[in-house]
Amino acid sequence: MHVGSPCNMEGTKISEAQKLKEEGNKHYKAENYESAVASYTQALKLCPETDANRAVYYKNRAACHLKLENYDKALQDSSAALDITPGDTKALFRKCQALESLGAHEEAFKNAAKLNQLEPNNVAVQTMLRKLGERINEKIKQNSSTNNKVEQMFKALSHQDKPDVEKQRQAAQNLVVLAREEAGAEKIFRENGVGRIQRLLETGDEEVMLSGLRVLSCLCKGHRARATAVMREFTLHTLGKYISSTKEELANAAATVLLTALKAMIGTNPKEVKNKDEALVLDLSEDFKKMLMFLLGLLTDKNVSGYGRDAVIDIIIKFVPRREGTGRALTFITNGGLNKLLIVAGQVPELKRLGHWQYRMHTSVAMDKIYEEMGSDKNRNYFKDLINKYLSEKFSANLMESNMEALTAISALLQGPYDVGQELLSKEGVMQVMVAMAASPEPLHQRIALETIIHSAKKKDKCTGVLQAGVEIMKTLYESKNDHIRVRALVGLCKIGSSGGSDYSVKLFADGSTVALSKEARRFLKSAKKDHDIKKWAAEGIAYLSLDGDVKEELVDDSQALKAVIQLAQSGDDTVLYPIISMFVNLTNSYDTEKIDPEMIKLAEYAKQHIPQTHPKDDKEYVTKRVKKLLKEGIVTALVALSRTDSHSSRELLSRVYLAIVEDEDHRGLVVQQGGAKALLPLGIDGNEVGKAKAAHALAKIAITMNPEIAFPGQRSLELVRILISLLHVERSGLENFEALMALTNLAGLNDSIRTRIIKEEGLSKIEHYMWEDHEMLRRAATECMCNIVVNEQAADLHCLENDRVKLLTIYLGEEDPATAKAAAGALAILSHREEVCTKILTPKAWLELLQSVCASEDPDMRIRGVHIIANMIDSNKEVAAAVVQTSLLEILMALAQDTKLQSMGIKERVEFALKRAAEWELIKPKKDADKEEEELDEDD
């Protein structure tokens, strides 16, 4: 067997690496930056360490990383290239760009100065130097100003014999504002800020204390070294004291400090320059373990307030369940976290085991999220085993108090990892305990049993299971004189009544019973004498029944009941979120409905199978009237309040309701006016795919008919870009595609920042995709959008590359749809200021006929655009000008110059400019020479 020599093998690898580099270059030119990175990376793997070409591969990959905004990687690659070839100006320039983007302006300036020495005539380098110099000077001024302000604020906050409370509060608030900026945060930290803030918290003034905690959060945010130092100096013990506060805002603010610190210490900051203050950071594994045990200790600490416990569980929800390979969720439960959550979830307020009570829904969400992270069957079984062990111990105690805590914990599981809760209900003895408690004369026992029965029927297909078995219990308890028991029994009965969903043909109760239950629930809801708990349960009962058309109509006609629902939505109680949002979904019919093929209905009838029927009062006419009534009663303010939820399922339902409301163009102004557009933006960014799509569609509808500057002022319009681009996907409907394109067209007309953001979010290629669509309306919308975007220099640059973008626009001059043709003409009129574009306009064989059709159009706007295109082509270069002048377009220009109707629109000036440039190219004779020749010809005749 012949083995090639090492030299030959090395030569082959170098040759393959060169081919990969060329492949990467092609990907780069085509804007496929990810593919280009892959090619250069493969080339580096093949290329020997001693080969100087490695510098080129690093340098090219750095360029890709800059385009992808991976600035830290761009810095690493450009530095690696410079290690091989220190004098490489392109690599040095890219290093400067990366440093600038990472915020390391001083280091970028030093490198740019070195580059300027190597290339003293490079305008781009000089521009960068000037810009960096201005930023550094500005930063110096800002730091100087910030330093003075920080000192002034601390001076105002220092203890005096008779401190001015109002001045202290104002100074503390100002300190928060300063801490939000990096320079201010660093100055506060360096000036013993943590110690000073600790003294600030001892003032006892709640506003000053709140500001102090918020400053600490700002110091920790996105900065690992500071976060570590803050936590060690401030101490977990001190932080725990404030998390345990009975004041909700203080407890939440202290919990935010811990969560922000955790994120900074365990996570990474993509814009933080490598090695920045890393010397201050020690091994974090021990810190994380300490924080985890600290959180677990707070969970079951009797001294912690309900607000504090809620805040701790909120940290667990936001921080522990993360799929990052760290095994946080598994670490949490193996250290007793799940057991502690079950203890909290099983708390019965009346027993006062943990004192304060506030946290039932939070524990359900926490357990649900942690269960989701148990990806394998092995881990999920471990999760279930821990729960079974806990509940077995509770039930085996054979004490009523332990039974109550066990059932309460099962109720929490039924609201979280539902399937786990359902399995527990099927365990031997659990149902017997529940029935026995329901039959007890004690209202507390009855209430716990009822809640378990109700929560067991969370899913429609389970309503005939445990819930059906408890029907007699609920009917009996509905006669109770205790309103808390009655309303819960009512909710259970409502669940049975709604088990048919929106199917009009399914009725488990006699005619009129569902409406009667709804009426009784509304009575509970409207009574001023009833407490919040009773009203909350009444709202849940109505939510189930509101799938029925008759119930919907009665509810929207009951103004007092709707006002009560909206007040509940604004109460801040997380437990009312889902039922109220579900109620609004049902009232607006914004749930998905399956359209059944008529042929399938005939087959089902023949086979005597059940056919779902729509309630007559769910016709579009009824739904439209209901939406108007809901708007009149203030549903938007309720939706805005409900939008604070972190639940993805709730966020999806909210998005559905918003979309149903803005379907009518007349409603969109009110939605914006009452804060709906602002609340919709986060729904379009975070949530499940269906929810984000619905929110994006609602936002698109608003952006189409309203001035985006009013509906989405400032930064909001930039946030909207990515959301709208998400609708430009093959999985989205044609209507969603179309309305997203129209909304982007309006946005792109605002300013260049938005146009740049569209390009940055890879929107240009997606918009271009729809320009090739067969559907006329999609083609039109995409072309109109492109017309507004090409004003941007970067967009124009992309049209000058080797692609068919200009060719497509030229062909579209002959589109049958006038709006598409006009948009294409507008885009070319803008782009034809570029010489490369003018050359590309000549590419289609029918370019002459296409331009003639534009100039001969009956639409004055089209003729104007045609003149601008031809004038720019004549101006671009002699070759293109000659191609134009040698055709009938020259005669058309002269004819248009005589059209008095168009002269007021600037046509005459553009035509004269075009003729003048043609004369300068010596393609036609100047006007004076032509006149003289005509005179001479007249004399000869």
Image (cartoon, helix red, strand yellow):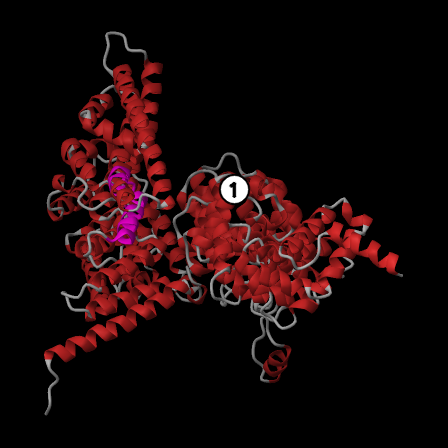
| Quarter assignment of residue 389 | bottom left
Circle 1 residue: 638
| Quarter assignment of residue 21 | bottom left
User: Which residue is found at the position 79% from the left and 52% from the top?
Assistant: 932
Mark 1: which amino acid? Ala
Q: In the picture shown, does residue 212 fall above or below 823?
A: above
From this viewpoint, is residue 165 visible? yes
From this viewpoint, is residue 734 visible? no
Expressed as whole percent of the image width and height from the top left, the position of residue 618 reads 64, 60
Expressed as whole percent of the image width and height from the top left, the position of residue 595 reads 59, 70
Expressed as whole percent of the image width and height from the top left, the position of residue 84 reads 17, 57
| Quarter assignment of residue 876 | bottom right
Question: From the image, which quarter does the C terminus lie in?
Answer: bottom right
Q: How many marks?
A: 1
Q: Which residues are magenta?
A: 88-111
Instruction: Look at the image and say whether residue 99 sits in the magenta stretch.
Output: yes
Residue 466 versus residue 725: which sits nearer the camera?
A: 725
Q: In the picture shown, does residue 777 fall above or below 310?
A: below
Q: In the displayed orientation, state which residue is furthest to the top.
A: 161
Main secondary-structure element of the magenta-colored stretch: helix
User: Which residue is found at the position 45% from the left and 42% from the top?
Assistant: 534
